[in-house]
Structures are given as structure tokens and as C-alpha cells.
Amino acid sequence: MVLPFVSINLVTFNSEKTIDNCLKSIFNLDYPRGKMEVVVADGGSTDGTLEILKRYRVKVISCEGRRIGECRQIALEESTGEVIVLTDSDVEVGRNWLRKLVETLNELEGEGVVGVGGPDTGIITNTVSRYIDMLPVHVKEYHGLVITSDDPMVISACNAAYKREALKEVGGFNRELNGAEDVEINWKLLRNGYKLAQTPEACIRHRRKETIKSFVRQRIRNSAGLGYICAQNKGLARLNWFLPSVSLILTFVFLWLVLKLETIQALTLFTVYLAILIVVGVWRIKGVGEEIKALNYPVLLFLFFLWMITEALGFMMGFSISMIRLRLLHSN
């Protein structure tokens, strides 16, 4: 197999704690140095990120004040690789990571596959990140090769390789998005008749959020992007994406009924509903596949419901903003 020229694209913003390890792992890849470039779109870092970038042979693009989707699109436009590989500044890649992505992409080309991703295992730095890693948020392992023609969440921008021509064909990344830009680009590729794949061999290590605040901000940003693109793209939305929002609305409805009616029946109904939510939470946490001690469940349930609430609020916010913008656009 003749290895193609590859562009590895990253988006950074105040990433001084992680970018050095990220680039060390990239420049330690078992891929020919002459057949790869690293393109970094920096969102206006004010810490030591830019100084660290100067130590490496990378192309740095200033994207101060730009959204993530626009940063990814600018990096794509500045890249020259036949294959565009995406990862994040808080990721550390395995030595054979890039080769496995490229080889899988090449092997499946005849089946119409234009994008390949892999699992996302955690880098644990403190107690909060350890608990966050236990949540059913990240795809940590794949059981064999999977090819899809309808799942836009099959691969994530922290670990993905795409055919450049396919990205150009669908118009690239949505510059308006500050989250879920990978879900939308996947959807556009699938809608154009292409397929996506995930391979268990292309594994990365992804630093988990170290504070509750940063975790909440990340989940709201991503879910707001998801809600936005669901309103923009007919046929994209999946029923389970609405479940956190529906659950939150039902919680307030039941709580209102309890306060309004002040009856034992309303209180019983609300208690049963909460019990169902707790059972679902435990089931989802156990579904991660890790052995979890009983003492960890109270903390994990708190984080799980916090995750669900932030997903719901972000999704409804993004969906509403998108619908308002569409209505204003049509009215003009």
C-alpha cells in the first residue's frame, strides 16, 4: 500500500497543559514524517499554547474569536493532505494510530467508506475526571470493525480520518457551529451515499474534564450544537436525542402537579417517575461495562443526572435558536 499524504488538524484554545503531550505523541507516530503535516487552528490562546507550538514543525493559523466549526473549516482549507485527520489538543495518540486509520480507510474504499474513527479511552488526572470517565459519554472500545450508512455519531472529531475530496463535496464544516460539527459533517457524508466506519485498532487517550464546571460547559456546548443541527437538517434527528429534554420537561410537569393538586396520588406518581429515572440511570452506568463499586453509585448518579440536565438545556437552547433563525430567514 502506498501511504497517502495526511493532514492532522487540531483546534486549540488555552491548551498549554495538554498540547505538548499531544504533539509529542503525534511526532512519535510510525508514519513517514514526509507524508504528514500538522495544522493547528488556534482560537486566540492567551496562555503558553503558542509558545509551545513554536517548538514543533506545525502550521499555526490564527482563528481568534472563531467558533469550532469555523476553525475546523479554516484548517481544512489550509491543509494539503489527501486524507484529513481530526483530533483534539487534549488527546494523546498511539504510535500506530494514524497508520491504522489510513489503512482501514484504504481497505474499505471499495465499500464506499470515506470516514474512519476509533475508540476514546480516558486520561485520568483527578477524582472528578475518574468519575466522569465512568459515565456512558465516551466510546471506549469497539467490538470489531463496524460500517454504517445511517449513524452520524459513529465517529467523533477527536479521532477521525476523512477523504479530503468527500469533505469538499459536501461543503466542509458548518462555520456557525460551536459543537456537534462532527455529527453534521458525518450526516452530510451519509446523506450523499457514503459510509463511515469505526475500527478498534485506532485508539486514542483523551483527557477527561477535571472540574464539574468544565464538564457542564462542554456538555451544554455540544448538546446545543446537536439541537441546532437537528432543526437545520431534516431527517437528522434521532428519537433518543430528545429523551433528556423530554425527561426534564416531564419532571417539571410532575412537580407542578404535586404542588398544584397536593394529593397523595400526584406525589405517588412523581415518586414512581423519579424511581424510574434512577433505575434508568443505574442501568446506563452499568452498561459502560466497568466494574463499579456500590459506594460510587451516588456520585455517579449525581453526575449522570447533571449530564442529562445539561444535555437537555443545551439541546433545547440550540434547537430553539435554530428554529428562530430559520423563521426569521423565511420571513425575510
Image (cartoon, helix red, strand yellow):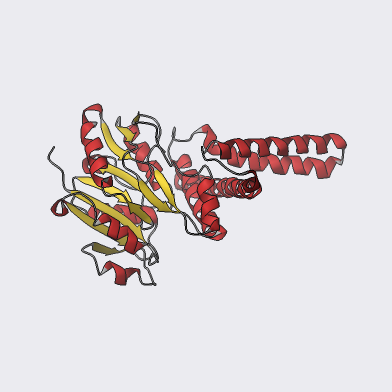
Q: Is residue 57 above or below residue 271?
A: below
Image quarter of residue 330? top left
Query: Residue at 62% of width from left, 38% of height from top?
Result: 282
Q: How many marks?
A: 0
Query: Residue at 32% of width from left, 34% of height from top?
Result: 196
Question: Is residue 226 something one can see in this rendering?
Answer: yes
Query: Residue at 36% of width from left, 39% of height from top?
Result: 186
Place of residue 220 in the rendered image (x, y in percent of width and height, measured from the top left): 53, 52
Q: Is residue 223 left or right of residue 38?
A: right
Q: Is residue 145 left or right of residue 163?
A: right
| Nearer to me, 317 or 276 | 276
Place of residue 113 in the rendered image (x, y in percent of width and height, measured from the top left): 27, 32
Place of residue 134 in the rendered image (x, y in percent of width and height, measured from the top left): 53, 46
Place of residue 318 in the rendered image (x, y in percent of width and height, measured from the top left): 51, 48
Q: Is residue 231 left or right of residue 262?
A: left
Q: Residue furthest right?
A: 263
| Nearer to me, 135 or 216 | 135
Q: Residue furthest top?
A: 111
Q: Quadrant of the N terminus?
A: top left
Image quarter of residue 107? top left
Question: Is residue 42 something one can see in this rendering?
Answer: no
